[in-house]
Image: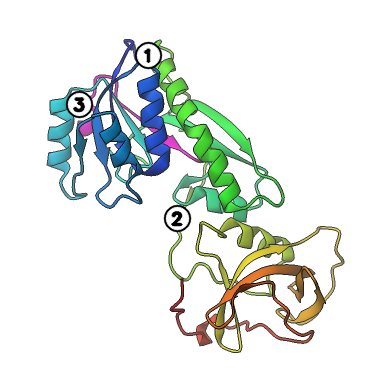
């Protein structure tokens, strides 16, 4: 069903971080009337609050448990449309109904796949060659509402989490403005996800950084670049000491053969070649509490630990 819109719309933005801050400025530059900003209870940084201050917009930071307070604030600001960019709460139907046109969410995933959390990391870990950015109507599900506008961005073989995050951050504000423009023009009906197969990604947490050397080289290549800076970095250990692997490389043309997973089988100026479950992996940057960040130079024959449970929690950044 079409959702008729008026231009300029009165918009309340709910969100967090640089994505939301840049989107807020883009909406103001697009001539939209901004009624205010809702910030997450525990924001990742101060960029959205700073943007609201620069634009002299009312700022509200509700507790996650204070649904009534959020509803009251939205009701008093009388927006036509709610725009969610990296907001961490599901807006239920009574709250969405407080805006005349409903609520849009903006998601860094190629819906209906990659619903959920940490989807940039998961897309790289899964070896995807592209990632989607999607504007969709919110419903009571998680990233399941009708899709209004979707674009894709490339993921190269050596692209890291930081590379793709930068690409997504640059793309989100234009997606927000263009999606809102479709709604304002009465062309925001969207495409239903209900009949489409989809996937859901859970959030990543402490302990998920560890991997086993018996995995394939391609998986480890993707895993390491998928959680490198600004992520926590992939983890292994050597003689019981935790090691962060920040960078590594695998070429699909390298030979496959059986060996001892986790054993150093070659060295060069670039780093060390480590045996995996099916081939090898060139490890080029590591960090440890004792040695700091460096290009590894472990002797051939060195065995990196396979059992992560023998390693004490690290105390270094």
Q: CA–CA distance between discs 1 and 2?
A: 33 Å
Label located before the other in sequence (2 or 3): 3
Q: Vertically, is 300 above or below 80?
A: below
Identify the residue position indicated by label 1 in the image. Answer: 184
Q: Is residue 91 left or right of 2 when viewed as pictured?
A: left
Identify the residue position indicated by label 3 in the image. Answer: 98
Q: Regarding mark 2 in the picture, which secondary structure is present there? A: loop
- Kindly identify which numbered label has been placed on residue 202: 2
Q: Which residues are magenta?
A: 94-109
| Residue depicted at x 80% and y 59% | 251
Q: Nearer the viewer, mark 1 or mark 2?
A: 1
| Residue depicted at x 46% and y 76% | 316
Q: Vertically, is 300 above or below 62?
A: below
**Tag 2 near tag 3, CB within 8 Å:** no
Q: Is residue 298 left or right of 53 when viewed as pictured?
A: right
Q: Vertically, is 11 above or below 92?
A: above
Q: Regarding mark 1 in the picture, which secondary structure is present there? A: helix
Q: Residues within 10 Å of mark 2 (few under 14, many from 20)?
A: few
| Residue depicted at x 35% and y 50% | 45
């Amino acid at each position: 069903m079409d959702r008729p819109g008026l231009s300029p719309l009165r918009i309340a933005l709910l969100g967090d971080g640089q994505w939301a801050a840049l989107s807020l400025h883009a909406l103001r530059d697009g001539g939209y009337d901004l009624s205010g900003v809702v910030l997450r209870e525990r924001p990742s940084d101060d960029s959205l609050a700073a943007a609201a201050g620069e634009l002299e917009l009312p700022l509200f930071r509700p507790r996650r448990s204070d649904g009534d307070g959020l509803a009251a604030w939205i009701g008093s600001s009388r927006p036509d449309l709610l725009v969610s960019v990296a907001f961490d709460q599901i807006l239920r139907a009574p709250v969405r109904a407080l805006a005349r046109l409903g609520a849009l969410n903006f998601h860094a995933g190629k819906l209906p796949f990659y619903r959920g959390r940490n989807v940039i990391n998961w897309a790289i870990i899964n070896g995807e060659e592209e990632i989607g950015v999607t504007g969709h109507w919110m419903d009571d599900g998680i990233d399941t509402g009708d899709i209004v506008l979707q674009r894709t961005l490339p993921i190269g073989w050596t692209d890291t989490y930081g590379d793709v995050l930068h690409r997504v951050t640059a793309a989100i504000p234009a997606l927000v403005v263009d999606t809102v423009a479709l709604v304002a023009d009465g062309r925001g009906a969207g495409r239903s996800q209900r009949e489409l197969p989809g996937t859901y990604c859970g959030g990543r947490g402490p302990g998920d950084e560890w991997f086993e050397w018996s995995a394939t080289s391609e998986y480890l290549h993707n895993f390491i670049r998928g959680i490198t800076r600004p992520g926590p970095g992939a983890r292994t250990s050597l003689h019981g000491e935790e090691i962060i692997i920040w960078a590594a490389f695998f070429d699909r043309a390298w030979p496959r053969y059986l060996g001892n997973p986790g054993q150093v089988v070659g060295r060069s100026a670039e780093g060390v070649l480590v045996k995996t479950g099916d081939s090898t992996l060139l490890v080029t940057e590591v960090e440890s509490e004792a040695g700091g960040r460096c290009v590894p130079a472990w002797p051939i024959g060195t065995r990196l630990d396979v059992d992560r449970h023998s390693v004490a929690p690290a105390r270094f950044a």
